[in-house]
């Protein structure tokens, strides 16, 4: 959907000072049915009454931290009215059609204390307004028009270099919030800590792999593996929120990260998920709701004082709007990774320059859904799965007229924004990506589309048709550095490669692809040590990457270590959502297949690291 009426922010900072108001009561007339009375002791609310003329300044609505609107109960009609004032200082929001004329509506987030509110005025969530008393007709009209713009409400003040939630520095980080006696085995690993201290000397560039020689078995571990800063931030945020709000219900939109053990640990601590990673609504007992309207669905039981955390992948505009409608303070609990938000900002920038945003990602992944939803609100957007899918888009680009339309519909049905016209909206394109995919694949897609456009428009003009500046710069460096470090590690000969991560973890799958390309069926994708059945057999997970050729079984039992191999060497890495504790458990499990006397104690391995350092 194109948000034609969007206006850029006019003020920075989340709290905007109210304008200087007149020292005596003033009445402003806004049109056929609008009049604002500005009292002398603002922020007392301003009343909307019948009037005849319209001034030019925007209408400003007052919201509180939960995105609830300041409303007034009319004495005369017992209906709710928005409390409006007129100001240039609010955060610009959308253009409303009022009495046949477009009128900018802005919002003020200035805190208003309860005792400042006069009789009959209060803050109400939109759902309460819709469910409650009748609405004054002009209030109902404004409410109708504002609904598609709701997701922008809490974020209006964010500029290009501002983020909803930035990574914490090491000093701000407090892992004791989530590492306790219940979760220590999950999150803590002395071995992983030693490897990271020795090899991960720089956050953004890979180093040489570490070698852990236990005697009977040897491990090669890349310099970078496991949790990225985005995941670590979101985990801390979730644990802190649960711990700091013992009297409140704490929900998460969907699983925090793609790791069943982390999500399970949070469930045990009382957190509940509103929906599955595919967006299916859940009930309190974790079962699937029958339908979106199911009264037992947690979505339908949300109360204003509930807390809903948005995970690192972000959320679609539709889900954000649902939360805002219910008066949930999403801004305070939005853990969207700043690198995901960086992609959204790039999409907004491209759309602003008239480019259609092509999202290289899996359409069923939460992050891609959120990016698509976000990008669609600024202009036409399209999702594209992989290089083979990009070839289809190249065919579409080469075709014209009805043939182009037919080919487009054939390959991209359900993957484009509302109103997308392949004859109009493929003239200028810009590629962004799901942050956790293979960098080389995104770059190959950009090159393929560029060469197709060179065929069509010529080399000199291609820059007008595809955005090439900083191509691929929306890839997440954390995913990239895990991949780079793995590329260094796969250069060594190994007997087996293990990639550990959740079943729906895209970045884990990309790591597995790197290993599979090198080691074939000696590379295995596992969720934890429990998938290692014994020394000879392992349960490998077949990731559903190619939707047209889905594997018959997702779990495949296959050979692990060849019994004839003495002192096997195993490459071991973990995706961005894999806690260190699981890596260490995998090592323990494999070590247990060998006689204890043939395995060097961990202390001696740690000592080697210390003397290396
Ligand atoms: S993988 Fe990258 S984009 Fe995703 S949460 Fe981690 S840092 Fe953020």
Image: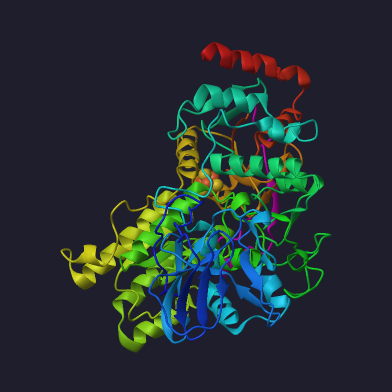
Q: Indicate left or right for 185 with 110 as reference.
A: right
Number of residue marks: 0
Query: Which of the 4 quarters of the picture holds residue 197?
Result: top right
What is the residue that sits farthest to the right in this orientation? 285
Of all residues shown, which one is farthest toward the front?
Answer: 24
Instruction: Determine the residue positioned at 80% across, 72% down.
Output: 295
- Whether residue 138 is visible to the viewer of this picture, yes or no, is yes
Quarter-of-image position of residue 401? bottom left
Q: Is residue 80 above or below residue 241?
A: below
State which region is magenta: 542-566
- What percent of the width, then of the height, locates residue 409? 45, 81
Q: Position of residue 427 (x, y in %)?
A: 29, 73
Q: Main secondary structure of the magenta part?
A: loop
Residue at 46% x, 39% y: name it. Answer: 481
**Residue at the top extreme, as displayed:** 611
Residue situated in front as seen by the camera: 228 or 37: 37
Q: Is residue 337 magenta?
A: no
Residue at image location 64% in from the left, 68% down from the top: 325
Judge by depth and name the residue closer to the eye, 268 or 107: 107
Q: Is residue 504 left or right of residue 166?
A: right
For image coordinates 63% across by 69% down, the residue present is 71
Q: Residue 269's quadrant in the figure?
A: top right
Up-down: is 258 above or below 26? above
> Where is residue 322 shown, x and y percent of the image?
64, 68
Work out whether residue 599 or residue 140 is closer to the camera in this orientation and state it: 140
**Relative to residue 584, is residue 104 depicted above or below?**
below
In the image: residue 201, left or right of residue 606: left
**Residue 489 point in image, percent of width and height:** 49, 34
Rendering colour mode: rainbow
């Amino acid at each position: 959907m194109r948000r034609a009426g969007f206006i850029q922010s006019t003020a920075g900072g989340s709290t905007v000072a109210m304008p200087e108001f007149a020292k005596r009561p003033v009445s402003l007339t806004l049109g056929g049915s609008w009049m604002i009375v500005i009292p002398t002791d603002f922020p007392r609310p301003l009343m909307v009454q019948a009037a005849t003329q319209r001034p030019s300044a925007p209408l400003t609505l007052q919201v509180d931290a939960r995105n609830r609107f300041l409303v007034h109960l009319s004495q005369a009609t017992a209906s709710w009215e928005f409390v409006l004032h007129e100001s240039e200082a609010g955060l610009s929001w959308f253009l409303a059609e009022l009495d046949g004329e477009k009128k900018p509506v802005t919002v003020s987030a200035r805190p208003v204390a309860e005792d400042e509110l006069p009789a009959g005025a209060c803050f109400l969530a939109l759902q309460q307004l819709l469910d409650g008393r009748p609405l004054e007709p002009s209030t109902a009209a404004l409410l109708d028009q504002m609904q598609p713009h709701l997701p922008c409400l809490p974020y209006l003040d964010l500029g290009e270099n501002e983020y909803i939630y930035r990574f914490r520095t090491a000093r701000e980080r407090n892992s004791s919030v989530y590492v306790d006696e219940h979760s220590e085995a999950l999150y803590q690993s002395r071995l992983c800590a030693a490897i990271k201290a020795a090899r991960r000397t720089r956050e953004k560039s890979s180093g040489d792999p570490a070698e852990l020689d236990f005697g009977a078995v040897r491990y090669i571990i890349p310099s970078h593996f496991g949790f990225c800063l985005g995941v670590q931030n979101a985990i801390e945020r979730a644990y802190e929120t649960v711990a700091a709000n013992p009297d409140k219900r704490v929900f998460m939109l969907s699983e925090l990260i793609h790791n069943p053990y982390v999500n399970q640990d949070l469930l045990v601590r009382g957190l509940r998920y509103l929906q599955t990673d595919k967006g299916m609504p859940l009930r309190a007992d974790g079962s699937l709701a029958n339908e979106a309207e199911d009264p037992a669905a947690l979505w339908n039981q949300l109360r204003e004082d509930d807390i809903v955390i948005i995970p690192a992948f972000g959320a679609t505009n539709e889900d954000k709007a649902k939360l805002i409608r219910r008066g949930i303070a999403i801004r305070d609990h939005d853990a969207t990774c700043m690198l995901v938000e960086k992609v959204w900002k790039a999409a907004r920038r491209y759309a602003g320059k008239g480019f259609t945003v092509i999202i290289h990602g899996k359409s069923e992944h939460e992050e891609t859904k959120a990016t698509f939803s976000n990008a669609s609100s600024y202009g036409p957007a399209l999702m594209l799965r992989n290089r083979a899918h990009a070839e289809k888009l190249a065919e579409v680009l080469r075709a014209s007229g009805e043939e182009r339309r037919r080919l487009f519909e054939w390959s991209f049905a359900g993957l484009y924004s509302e109103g997308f016209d392949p004859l109009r909206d493929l003239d200028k394109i810009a590629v962004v990506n799901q942050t956790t995919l293979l960098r080389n694949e995104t770059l190959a897609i950009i090159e393929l589309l560029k060469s197709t456009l060179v065929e069509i428009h010529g080399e000199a003009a291609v820059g007008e048709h595809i955005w090439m500046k900083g191509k691929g710069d929306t890839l997440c460096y954390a995913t990239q550095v895990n991949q780079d470090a793995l590329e260094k590690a796969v250069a060594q000969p190994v007997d087996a490669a293990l990639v550990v991560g959740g079943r729906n973890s895209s970045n884990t799958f990309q790591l597995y692809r790197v290993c599979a390309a090198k080691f074939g069926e000696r590379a295995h994708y596992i969720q934890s040590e429990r998938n290692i059945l014994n020394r000879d057999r392992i349960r490998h997970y077949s990731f559903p990457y190619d939707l047209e050729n889905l594997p018959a079984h997702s779990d495949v039992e296959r050979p692990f270590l060849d019994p004839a191999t003495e002192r096997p060497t195993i490459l071991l890495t973990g995706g961005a959502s894999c806690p260190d504790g699981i890596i260490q458990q995998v090592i323990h499990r494999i070590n247990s297949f060998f006689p204890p006397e043939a395995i060097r104690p961990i202390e001696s391995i740690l000592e080697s690291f210390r003397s290396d350092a």
